[in-house]
């Protein structure tokens, strides 16, 4: 290299270093200015909350990554109170007034962060569509598949799957059964049949079981993006997905196969979601992954499966933990129905008030969607008046929400918030005024136009599974450490130390493990075994 070339190289390096120095300086200064603004001048500066949350969404992102956002939000709420700044532009509330002002308010829409959960950019499902007109259209259509009426038509299919589940329990012959595994499979098979009439058969055949973990992976990603939107911009997650290419491709080809096999049949060959939406959401055979039906499928399957499975796992955990509740529910079930096969939807099942109370108390203690459902003033709002939530003027661009888990453990409304007390929901056991106050605060399915349309299906499935399981079996925790799976303990960290609380890991829906239960068939008569 000649002297001239060396000098030119050095000058270039000098230029690069100088630009880097000034760029870093500019970046650090802007960052410090932004932090200073968020802390001292921002319109939300007066609200209490964790300092780190006030300067960055990374705070919520950290807890989303550890799947403990719900637990931490409650801890923070105990410290900072019922209105908390939980991000530079975010406020979390906890009151019945706030619930109404946020979720039953026509001026409010889902936050833009929901759109970050879409698998194909620009193609939205019922869950993540923000535009109000597009939502109304989808909701009307898809709501038909999971309405109470539709559930009546679907009940026989649901019962067939529950029978398979009961046989699996009977075949366990006293060995511990991990209920998360079994119930996630049961609910996945049910929702697969409801969506596309496809027998996924995860209960009996391992081939499609990977769908369950694939959905958990997708939901984890969605939660991270919603709590810490910046992470989406970094595209780190896309890199991770590229590393898992084989799994992602396997997932896509399976969903493609499911949709394609249904499309090959006559639209009205069976009563399922597809038969209802097919005319309006035609799958694009060239690019199925970019179609609306695809977007609906990848949301509908986990939305319908994970949530109900969580409710059932938690219910069995609390029943095994609370002998008095277990006995009362067993008595109600076993005296109401003469035979296990008589347990079907209808007035007799609806008359099992204690069963309903047990499900509701489970949904209060362990809401399957335990996080904060972010909302903001709709871009379509033209009123020109400030948005008011619980008496507070919400500045433009600020997201508001109620955290389901923290809210359901608010001691002011639910005395002994961590106790499993189904009686609190019963007319004769709890004074009317207190019950009314609790009912106003009890929102596991959310409220308003974006509430859960799968509520009827969830109660039907949960009621049938619980009643039938208790009719055919007695159950208890497995012995020793195995029987502690799913329970809290001090090693899991602050807020997770209660042994009587079923531990959920928030990923929009929830992941969990256990409980490990031992099942003993209750009736050994010939009729009973034939029944099963
Ligand atoms: C115990 C069971 C369930 C619980 C606790 C539950 C809870 C919820 C909650 C809290 C939301 C609002 C989410 C948000 O605003 O971000 C929601 C929405 C939704 N759920 Fe459920 N869900 C359950 C079961 C189901 C089932 C069985 C289905 C269907 C098969 C379903 C389908 C949906 C759909 C489609 C939405 C989006 C609705 C919209 O945005 O208009 N859910 N659910």
Image (cartoon, grey):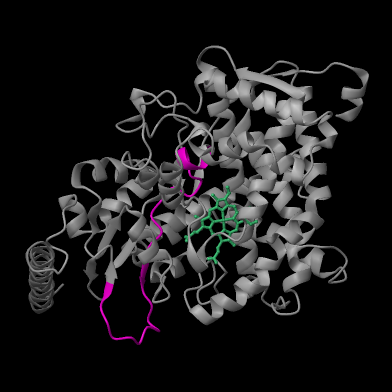
Front residue (pair 324, 27): 324
For the residue pair 372 and 148, the one nearer the viewer reads as 148
Q: Residue at x 70, y 43 (%)?
A: 350
Outermost residue toward the top?
Answer: 480
Residue 15 belongs to magenta span: no
Percent x, y for residue 71? Answer: 35, 40
Horizontally, residue 426 falls left or right of residue 68, namely right
369 in magenta? yes
Say which quarter of the image contains residue 317.
top right
> Residue 182: x percent and y percent?
67, 35
**Rendering coords of residue 81 (x, y %):** 21, 48
The answer to which quarter of the image holds residue 490 is top left
- Quadrant of res 154: bottom right
Q: Residue at x 68, y 37 (%)?
A: 352
Q: Which residues are magenta?
A: 362-387
Residue 235 visible from this viewpoint: no
Query: Ligand 1 is located in which of the four quadrants?
Result: bottom right
Q: Is residue 142 visible?
A: yes
Side of 66 where 315 appears, left or right: right
């Amino acid at each position: 290299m000649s002297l001239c070339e060396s000098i030119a190289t050095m000058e270039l390096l000098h230029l690069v270093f100088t630009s880097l120095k000034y760029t870093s300086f500019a970046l650090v200064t802007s960052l410090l200015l932004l932090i200073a603004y968020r802390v001292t001048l921002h319109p939300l500066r007066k609200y209490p909350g964790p300092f780190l949350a006030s300067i960055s969404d990374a705070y919520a992102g950290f807890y989303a990554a550890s799947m403990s956002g719900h637990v931490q939000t409650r801890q923070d709420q105990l410290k900072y109170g019922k209105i908390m700044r939980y991000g530079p532009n975010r406020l979390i509330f906890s009151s019945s007034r706030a619930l109404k002002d946020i979720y039953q308010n026509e001026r409010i829409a889902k936050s833009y962060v929901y759109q970050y959960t879409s698998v194909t950019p620009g193609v939205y499902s019922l869950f993540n569509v923000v535009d109000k007109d597009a939502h109304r259209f989808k909701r009307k259509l898809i709501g038909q598949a999971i309405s109470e009426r539709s559930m009546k038509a679907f009940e026989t299919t649901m019962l067939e799957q529950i029978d398979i589940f009961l046989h699996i329990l009977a075949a366990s012959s006293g060995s511990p059964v991990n209920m998360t595994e079994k119930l996630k499979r049961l609910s996945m098979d049910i929702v697969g049949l409801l969506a596309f009439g496809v027998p996924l058969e995860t209960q009996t055949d391992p081939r499609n079981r990977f769908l369950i973990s694939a959905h958990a992976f997708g939901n984890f990603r969605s939660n991270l993006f919603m709590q810490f939107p910046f992470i989406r911009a970094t595209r780190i997650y896309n890199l991770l997905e590229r590393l898992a290419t084989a799994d992602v491709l396997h997932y896509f080809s399976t969903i493609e196969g499911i949709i394609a096999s249904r499309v090959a049949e006559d639209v009205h060959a069976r009563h399922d979601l597809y038969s209802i939406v097919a005319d309006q959401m035609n799958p694009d055979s060239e690019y199925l992954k970019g179609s609306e039906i695809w977007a609906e499928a990848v949301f509908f399957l986990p939305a319908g499966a994970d949530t109900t499975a969580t409710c059932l796992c938690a219910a069995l955990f609390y029943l095994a933990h609370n002998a008095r509740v277990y006995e009362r529910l067993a008595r109600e079930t076993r005296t109401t129905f003469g035979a296990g096969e008589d347990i079907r939807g209808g007035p007799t099942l609806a008359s099992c008030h204690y069963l309903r109370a047990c499900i509701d108390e489970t949904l209060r203690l362990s809401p399957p969607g335990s996080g904060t459902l972010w909302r903001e003033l709709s871009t379509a709002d033209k009123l020109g008046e400030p948005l008011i939530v619980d008496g507070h003027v919400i500045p433009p661009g600020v997201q508001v929400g109620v955290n389901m888990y923290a809210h359901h453990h608010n001691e002011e409304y639910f005395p002994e918030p961590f106790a499993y007390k189904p009686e609190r929901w019963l007319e004769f056991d709890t004074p009317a005024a207190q019950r009314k106050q609790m009912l106003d605060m009890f929102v596991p399915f959310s409220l308003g136009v974006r509430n859960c349309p799968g509520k009827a299906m969830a109660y039907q499935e949960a009621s049938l599974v619980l009643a039938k399981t208790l009719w055919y079996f007695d159950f208890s925790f497995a012995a020793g450490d195995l029987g502690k799976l799913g329970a809290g303990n001090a090693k899991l960290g602050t807020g997770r130390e209660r042994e009587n609380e079923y531990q959920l890991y928030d990923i929009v829906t929830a992941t969990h493990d256990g409980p490990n239960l031992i099942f003993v068939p209750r009736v050994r008569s010939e009729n009973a075994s034939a029944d099963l």
